[in-house]
Image: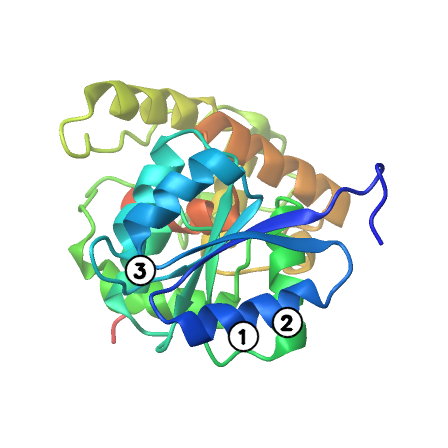
Amino acid sequence: MTTEATPAIRVLLADDQALVRGGFRMILDARPGIEVVGEAGDGAEAVELVGGSTPDVVLMDVRMPTMDGVEATRRIAASGSAARVIILTTYDLDEYVFAALRAGASGFMLKDVRPAELVDAVRVVARGDALLAPTVTRRLLDRFAQTLPSVADAPSPDGPAGRRRAGAGSLDRPVRAVSPPEVGGEAGRGARIRIGLEELTEREAVVLRLVALALSNAEIAAELVLTEATVKTHVSAVLRKLGLRDRVQAVVFAYDHGLVRPRPN
């Protein structure tokens, strides 16, 4: 049972197949500390229910009638809701999943996921972490990121800054070289992004690139000769300065703004 000190994780299920929703509800309701607070049969209903049921986590099917999971995720993120979205998909290399990650999803998982993995994913995302499967996420971005805007003068992760180690004192200098393009005419957002990038120290910019290369905190710590706690502090600073929700959004951001280039297929 949950106590006042540990409130239940509130989950909303969004899938156009009632059997899928029923199966996920049965799995989640059987676990302590998790409560299914609603079900939606399409994206529009999911957006409406998020406003009324205030879930912590939304399990969102990426392909639904009326409004798909991509648009629903975009609207939930734009609404300012604290709900985190996990995209459900049949195929890992799916352009819809890629679009959903760019829209604000905190991760994705296959529909044939094992019950224990589903429960773990809900708990991971509910506590504010990203559901980032590094290999699959990187492969997904490498495949579909060819449509991202080109930033010709963006720093290369293989350049001098990307190879520096923590011993170089200059890594604490703010980075001024990156100026991302305006996206979709959103001048205000573009300005905020530019300011955020300018506020990153060189070390934080390196950490961002390594996060985008799907390295864990432990791997980044080994690469830069830092403690994991220090890396976690740098990652938190990057997310705060760039206004990003989690590591998944940091990965997408780095691809979007040319800090990491897609690998050839």
* Residue 260 appearing in the image: no
Residue type at mark 2 is: Ile
Q: Is residue 104 above or below residue 86?
A: above
User: What numbered label is drawn on residue 250?
Assistant: none
Q: Position of residue 136 (x, y in %)?
A: 44, 72
Marks 1 and 2 in Cβ contact (< 8 Å): yes
What kind of element bears circle 3?
helix
State which tag comes first along the sequence, 3 or 1: 1
Placement of the C terminus among the 4 image quadrants: bottom left
Asked whether the residues under the numbered discs 3 and 1 touch, taking CB atoms below 8 Å apart as contact, a structural biologist would say: no
Please tell me in which quadrant of the rendered image residue 123 appears.
bottom right
Q: Where, by quadrant of the figure, is residue 63 drawn?
A: bottom left
Camera-nearest residue between 167 and 33: 33
Q: Mark 3 points at which residue?
A: 98
Q: In this view, does 176 lie to the left or right of 32?
A: left
Give the foreground label among 3 and 2.
Answer: 2
Residue, x 63% and y 71% (percent of image)?
Answer: 27
What percent of the width, then of the height, locates residue 150?
Answer: 18, 46
Q: Say which residue appears at 26% left-offset and 25% top-offset.
A: 190
Q: Which mark is residue 27?
A: 2
Q: Is residue 125 above or below residue 89?
A: above
Q: Separation of disc 3 and disc 2 at Cα?
A: 27 Å
Q: In this view, does 50 lie above or below 95?
A: above
- Res. 136 in view: yes
Residue at 47% across, 68% down: 21
Which residue position holds label 1? 23
- The secondary structure type at the circle numbered 2 is helix
